Amino acid sequence: MNKTPAFSPKRIHAMTIGFFIVAVCFIIYKYSEDRKKEAFVIYKIKERKGPLSNTVEWKNVRNNANFLTESIKKNPTDVKLKVSISSLFIQEGRITGDYAYYDKAAMKYVDDALAIDSSNFDALALKSLLYLSQHHFAEGIAFADKAKTINPYSAFVYGVLVDGNVEMGNYEKAVETSDKMVSIRPDLRSYSRIAYLREIHGDYAGAIDAMKLAVEAGAPGDETTEWCRVQLGQLYENTGDLRDAEMQYILSIEERPGYPPALAGLSRMAIVKKDYAKALNYLQQGDSSSLSEQFKDQMIDLYTLMGNKKEADRLSKIMIAEMTSLAKMGDNDQSVGHYADRELAMAYLKIIDYDNAIKHALIEYNRRPLNIDVNETVAWVYYNMGEFQKALPYLKTALRTNSKNPGLLCKAALIYSKTGSSDSARNIFNSVLSKNPVIQSQLEKASRAALSKL
């Protein structure tokens, strides 16, 4: 008499389905429980550090945040209050660089608002902005499009769509959207986006003009105004106008003492003058008051330039650990998940870990294969790996907007010099280096060495 095996294929199949259903139910239950717990969490504003904590602005922001927090406790279903505190937290994250905390806090209140009113325009627009902050660009565009159907005349939501389309590499769409934005509201936000679009299409003169308009449209000392002033300084850096670049950073520090992005700019100016001690001091000041990885990244390059490879490697590993940790947090909590694969690729490249560098570069490329910065990253990793032919198609995409960014062009010339296009390499090197723009020191050194051999 035949007996059915204890673990026949049919039984194994049935057990597998059963386990899958149980797992799905558990995930749904856990998500539901987590959302219930999150609903009762009250996020408060955190104390600022450094010079940013000694301003009248900070006192006003803190008082407003505390007022909103107490008001929400008394009126937990007030959508306007939740939108207001979310907006405040988004701005505070931008100022302090503490995106892990403030993105999570802002997303909690945005989700609370949408749970009460799923078609609330302000909440949808802020959620799209938060997704962009976390580098979830496709999701950000989707929420911005939804918000636009509710209010098709909001310059703010068109600004989010400009940013999202730029990051996804949809440059024609970004230009079209920026035109719509500026027609609705010609102000700091629209001018600054026009400036960036002109920059990535190779029009530096036009970009500088637009960024000047952005600065003039803002209130001196306001964070968004000083951010634009720093961007203007970087445009001057890229065109070799170091006097005007440094002037913008000095003005920014005068208008907003201790402003971290301006300190980063002054550090680059000090490096040009080979005053490495002053450059390091500026970066340490910025790092003490902002959690932005920009300062560690620049310090890594500076330590390398100074010959302190041990400290450069130590900081690189800290950066990698911090970015990896933040990305992993998103596996369990989407409100804090931050894609950082492009940044991780460059960080791994600095410690000559090519396997991880190309892995993360390609992960980012698969998310947004049309973005010129992502393609530049992949091409540059392949160049450093000695895979020069593999770099070429990515380089072609990186150059498709006719960008005149000196760093990109130097990388292009280096790749061309290794792939049989010596004339193109020589012409690009001569064109870029003759203008003396500010370029990352190791890249400039490699470019001048390559030019001397052509």
Image: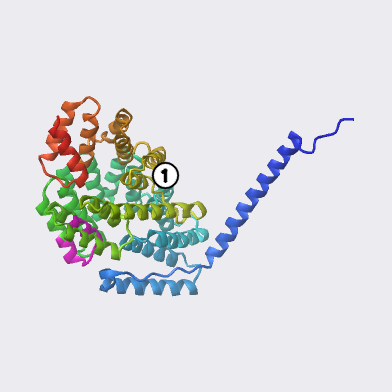
Secondary structure category for the residue under label 1: helix
| Residue extent of the magenta highlight | 250-267
Residue at x 22%, y 66% (from the top left corner): 258
Question: Which quarter shows the N terminus?
Answer: top right
Quadrant the C terminus occupies? top left
Question: 37 above or below 339?
Answer: below
Q: Is residue 8 above or below residue 141?
A: above
Magenta span: predominant SS is: helix
- Most distant residue in the top direction: 420
Q: Is residue 148 left or right of residue 247?
A: right
How far across and down, in percent of the image, does residue 349 sit?
A: 33, 43
Q: Is residue 32 visible?
A: yes
Colour mapping: rainbow
Residue holding disc 1: 138
Instruction: Write down the quadrant of residue 230 in the picture.
Output: bottom left
83 and 15: which one is in front? Answer: 15
Q: Is residue 64 left or right of residue 299?
A: right
Is 370 magenta? The answer is no
Q: Is residue 117 left or right of residue 252?
A: right
296, above or below 195, in the image: below
